[in-house]
């Protein structure tokens, strides 16, 4: 095999390896708090699709600012409509009312959505978020007949970020079904990686020759 063919072969292999680094939308991470012990309290870390998410309350309140609870059945039906099964809510540190929940990801993401509930039967409060890339927004949900608390879905898409901070002026709030989309490396980055890897492979082969 000629040197040129070896170079092309090495570059093709490197491009294939580089493309494997690109996250697929099918690999979007989901954190639904299922299969976790009821009563697990912040801070804790969950992993989905290879992406770690650390959930924490304020330093002066944790451990216990938030905890995993379960959607229980009341005399009039289930407590929540959107949050089936387990969800994250206020923890045993009951002085944590109004505390912010911070979620830190192990790699950049570009979008998220989550279901939420607000402990506010008067429907006069909101859930707000802020990312460390200056993304922000809020939602107040809606009251559904047969349920006591407002619920809704909060979502955002924007520049890459690694941190979401959630806070509400309700007494407390609940979240579930957090979905995040990993950031996709720029094509130029993959090409540079592939070229560099191809050069390294070729150099090692030449050294052995």
Image: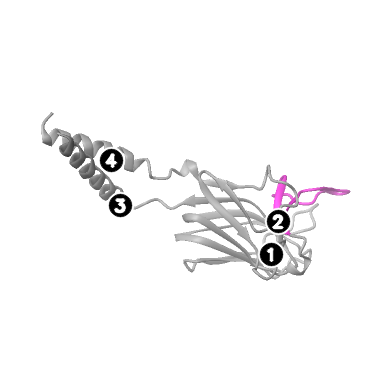
| Residue where numbered disc 2 is placed | 41
For label 1, count other residues whose C-alpha is less than 10 Å away and answer few (under 14), some (14-19) or many (20+). some
| Residue where numbered disc 4 is placed | 15
For label 2, count other residues whose C-alpha is less than 10 Å away and answer few (under 14), some (14-19) or many (20+). many
| Residue where numbered disc 3 is placed | 189
Residues drawn in magenta: 67-90
Furthest toward the front, the residue is 208
Q: Nearer the viewer, residue 49 or 206?
A: 206
The reply to whether dot 3 and dot 1 touch (C-beta < 8 Å) is no
| Residue where numbered disc 1 is placed | 62
The reply to whether dot 2 and dot 1 touch (C-beta < 8 Å) is yes
Q: Earlier in the sequence, mark 1 or mark 4?
A: 4
The image quarter containing residue 208 is top left
| Gap in angstroms between the C-alphas marked 3 and 4 | 11 Å
Q: Nearer the viewer, residue 134 or 58?
A: 58
x then y, percent, for residue 24: 43, 43
Q: Secondary structure at mark 4?
A: helix
Horizontal side of 152 relative to 120 (left or right) equals left
| Gap in angstroms between the C-alphas marked 2 and 3 | 39 Å
Q: Earlier in the sequence, mark 2 or mark 1?
A: 2
Residue drawn at x 26%, y 47% is: 191
| Gap in angstroms between the C-alphas marked 1 and 4 | 45 Å
Residue drawn at x 18%, y 42% is: 203
| Gap in angstroms between the C-alphas marked 2 and 1 | 8 Å
């Amino acid at each position: 095999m000629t040197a040129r063919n070896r170079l092309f072969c090495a570059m093709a292999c490197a491009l294939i390896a580089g493309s494997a680094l690109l996250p697929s939308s099918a690999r979007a991470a989901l954190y639904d708090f299922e299969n976790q012990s009821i009563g697990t309290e912040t801070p804790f870390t969950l992993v989905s699709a290879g992406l770690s998410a650390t959930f924490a309350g304020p330093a002066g309140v944790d451990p216990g600012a938030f905890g995993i609870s379960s959607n229980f059945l009341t005399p009039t039906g289930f407590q929540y409509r959107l949050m089936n099964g387990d969800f994250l809510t206020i923890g045993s540190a009951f002085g944590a009312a109004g505390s912010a929940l911070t979620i830190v990801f192990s790699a950049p993401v570009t979008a998220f959505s989550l279901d939420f509930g607000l402990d506010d039967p008067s429907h006069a409060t909101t859930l707000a978020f802020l990312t460390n890339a200056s993304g922000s927004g809020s939602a107040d949900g809606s009251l559904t007949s047969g349920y006591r608390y407002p619920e809704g879905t909060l979502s955002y898409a924007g520049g890459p970020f690694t941190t979401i901070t959630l806070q509400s002026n309700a007494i407390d709030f609940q979240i579930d079904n957090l979905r995040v989309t990993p950031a996709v490396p720029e094509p130029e980055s993959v090409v540079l990686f592939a070229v560099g890897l191809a050069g390294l492979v070729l150099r090692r082969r030449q050294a052995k020759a």
